[in-house]
Image: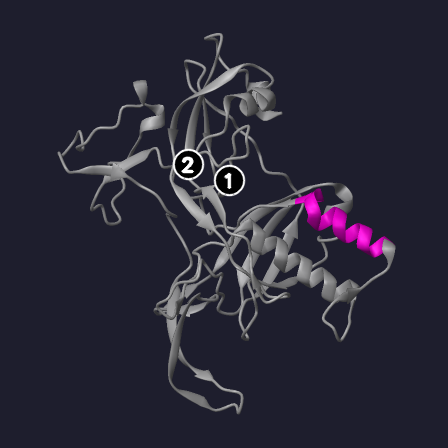
Amino acid sequence: MKITATLVEATQVAALATSDQLNRTETHIPGWVVRGAFASSWLRARANRMPSGRFEMSDAERALFVETFEGGVRFSPLFVKDPPTSLSVFGHKYEGKDRSHRLDTALKPNFAAPEDCPSCGATFESKRGLVEAPPARTRTSVSIGDAETAREGLLFSRRSLEPSRLWSQQQFASTLTGWLTGSETGLAQLKDLTTIRLGGRRTTQALTALEISAGEPTVDPEILDDGTLILRLTSPAVLIDGTGRPVNRPTDAYLSGALGLGVRVVKAWTRWERIGGWHMASGLPKHTELTVTAGSTFAVRALDGGGIPRDSATQ
């Protein structure tokens, strides 16, 4: 199913905590935040919250919850437009809004990356990030103490995505889209939800209007003329080797099993990042994972020298 989410209130999706008193925000809505927001909305509608903070529900309702939110449904990230730029894309170091000189080295012979622009000689570098994102605004507030009065000298700032409204004299719609995929039973639990609240909801923020429509994401494998398969991450990935250690590319054994034929990764464009957060229910930090960032790209070839069949890449 396709999700169309429109921000009704300012929304902060926290990144990792820092020591500079600025609560930053992501410029898109990660999939784990979407999952948590749907789970919270489902629990408010279907379960009874006890004074202890735990939710009480029947065994049947609990089974539905587990099937929906513990693996039965996959929640994609929400983007304004396109997923993050592939790390295999190079362009001017100082390009501004002019992206006409960009080139994708994953599509070039031998994956060659020029140091300078072939047209004008300007310095080239790998690009990353989102092409388009909702506008963000930083607000500074004073901390409130137990007596509901301001604490002297204790200021903090919060950067939030702006809601849909009149922005810079233009009507701006902060609308993001993504997908829900999974079992029919799990998806049926979500299709009637019309609003969710994204993030921790520590303030009156993050109210989001939903439109959920039928449909499935289309898969169009990117296979080059020589049979090389190009894989691009639209969200961060936890990749491990055979001993469970983090690696920056999927192992050949894993990809061979997924594609149903012997393959190897011949080129990877990657960056590391750490993913963490705060678990509001327990008041504890979430486990921080070492991940490969969204936009990481991998070139995969068959061991026998032939092309990778399109059917294998879409299964």
Label 2 packing within 10 angstroms: few (<14), some (14-19), many (20+): many
Q: Marks 2 and 1: in contact by CB < 8 Å? A: yes
Going from N to C along the chain, the mark reached first, 1 or 2, is: 1
Number of the front mark, 1 or 2: 1
Alpha carbon of mark 1 to alpha carbon of mark 2: how far? 9 Å
Image coordinates for residue 45, horizontal then vertical, percent: 75, 65
Q: Nearer the viewer, residue 235 or 214?
A: 235
Label 1 packing within 10 angstroms: few (<14), some (14-19), many (20+): many
Q: Name the image quarter holding the N terminus.
A: top right
| Residue at the spot of label 1 | 237
Residue 258 placement: quadrant: top right
Is residue 149 magenta-colored? no
Left or right? Give the position of 33 relative to 194. Answer: left
Q: Nearer the viewer, residue 87 or 314?
A: 87
Q: Secondary structure at mark 2?
A: loop
Identify the main secondary structure in magenta.
Answer: helix
Q: Amino acid at mark 1?
A: Ala
Position of residue 282 relative to residue 113, above or below, is: below
Residue 126 placement: quadrant: top left
Image coordinates for residue 19, horizontal then vertical, percent: 37, 66
| Residue at the spot of label 2 | 296
Q: Name the image quarter holding the C terminus.
A: top right
Residue lying at 64% horizontally and 66% vertically, measured from the top left: 281
